[in-house]
Image (cartoon, rainbow, N blue to C red):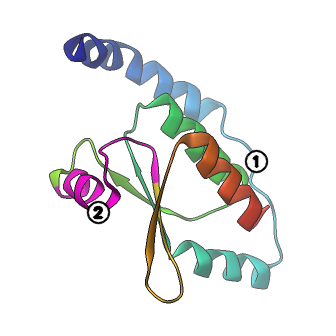
Amino acid sequence: MKLFFRLLRAILGPFMLLKERLSRPQGIVRAPEDQAKVDAACQKLALYQFATCPFCIKVRQEMRRLSLTVEFRDAQKSAQHRQALLTQGGSPKVPCLQITDDKGKVRWLYESGDIIRYLQQQFA
């Protein structure tokens, strides 16, 4: 079953990435000082993702719509990122948003819908 999905992703992946590129949303335009604050807040976020995961694409599109500069960590191609996701986050599932608060406490947010709601609450 796992092999089937890998094969399916290998075949459909390039088409999914092309669709993502062609349907990029316009980002929110903010005043420079407001965008600087958003960029500073985004420094405390990291998105663990796979390039061709449809749920990851959905989250990345919302990040573009909100004009967010979040670090993307590929948990499929990087063993280090996958291991961090598994040992620190508790599951190798993507997408996963790593949120570090002002005190350095890390929170791991799974599920694309939950991630999008969090981003909208923080940055919309």
In depth, the one of 65 and 86 nearer the eye is 86
Which element type, helix, strand or loop, lies under badge 1? loop
Which element type, helix, strand or loop, lies under badge 2? helix
Image coordinates for residue 63, horizontal then vertical, percent: 63, 53
Q: Is residue 77 left or right of residue 38?
A: left
* Three-letter residue code for mark 2: Gln
* Magenta region includes residue 88: yes
* Three-letter residue code for mark 1: Gln
Image coordinates for residue 106, horizontal then vertical, percent: 43, 73
Q: Residue furthest left?
A: 79
In depth, the one of 107 and 116 nearer the eye is 107
Number of other residues with Cα within 10 Å of mark 1, as a class: few under 14, some 14 to 19, many 20 or more = few
Q: Which span is picked out in magenta?
A: 80-96
Residue at figure coordinates x 72%, y 76% from the top left: 35
* Magenta region includes residue 10: no
Q: Which corner quadrant of the image does residue 98 belong to?
A: bottom left
Quadrant location, the N terminus: top left
Residue 113 sits above or below residue 105 on the image: above
Quadrant location, the C terminus: bottom right
Residue 68 sits above or below residue 59 on the image: below
Q: Is residue 14 left or right of residue 80?
A: right
Residue at figure coordinates x 61%, y 77% from the top left: 41
Q: Residue furthest bottom?
A: 103
Number of other residues with Cα within 10 Å of mark 2, as a class: few under 14, some 14 to 19, many 20 or more = some
The mark nearer the N terminus, 1 or 2, is 1
Residue at figure coordinates x 59%, y 51% from the top left: 115
Q: Is residue 30 left or right of residue 74?
A: right
In depth, the one of 112 and 75 nearer the eye is 112
- Residue that mark 2 sits on: 88
Q: CA distance from mark 1 to mark 2?
A: 34 Å
Image coordinates for residue 53, horizontal then vertical, percent: 43, 31
Which label is found at residue 26?
1
